[in-house]
Image: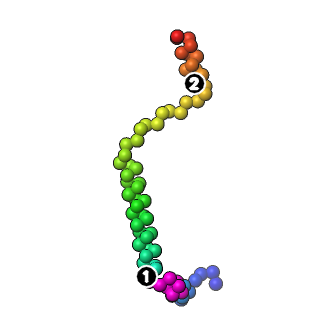
Amino acid sequence: MGSLSIWHWIIVLVVVLLLFGRGKLSELMGDAAKGIKAFKKGMADDDETPSKPAEPVRSLDHQNNVEAERSKVG
C-alpha cells in the first residue's frame, strides 16, 4: 500500500490533463523553460563582469593598532 502502481500514475495524469488541458501545460512548461534560460543567462553575465576585489575585513583591534602607530609617527 506504500507505493503507487502505474495505474495510479495514469489516473493522476488523466485528471491533470482534464483540469489544465494540453495547452495550459505546454504554456507552463514554456514559461518554466524561459525562466531557466534567463537564470542561466544571468549567471553567465555575473561570471563575465569583473568585480572589484573586496577590501579585507578589519577588526577593531587592527584599527586601534593602526591608529596607535599613526599617532606615534606623526
Tell which of 68 and 30 is nearer to you: 30
Callout 2, which amino acid? Gln
Mark 2 vs 1: CB contact within 8 A: no
Of badges 2 and 1, nearer the viewer stands: 1
Q: Residue at x 54, y 15 (%)?
A: 70
Measured along the vertical axis of the image, is residue 22 above or below residue 63? below
Q: Residue at x 40, y 67 (%)?
A: 34
Q: Position of residue 12 (x, y in %)?
A: 54, 85
Residue that mark 1 sits on: 23
Q: Position of residue 5 (x, y in %)?
A: 55, 85
Read off the magenta span.
Answer: 15-22
Measured along the vertical axis of the image, is residue 40 above or below residue 27? above
Q: Is residue 42 magenta?
A: no
Mark 2 burial class by Cα count in 10 Å: few <14, some 14-19, many 20+:
few
Residue that mark 2 sits on: 63
Measured along the vertical axis of the image, is residue 34 above or below residue 50? below
The secondary element bearing badge 2 is classed as: helix
Q: Residue at x 40, y 50 (%)?
A: 46
The secondary element bearing badge 1 is classed as: helix
Q: Position of residue 39 (x, y in %)?
A: 43, 59
* Cα distance between the residues tagged 2 and 1: 64 Å
Q: Position of residue 68 (x, y in %)?
A: 58, 16
Predominant SS along the magenta part? helix
Going from the N terminus, do you reach mark 2 or mark 1 first?
1
Relative side of 7 to 32, left or right:
right
Mark 1 burial class by Cα count in 10 Å: few <14, some 14-19, many 20+:
few
Relative side of 73 to 46, left or right:
right
Residue furthest to the right: 1
Q: Is residue 18 magenta?
A: yes
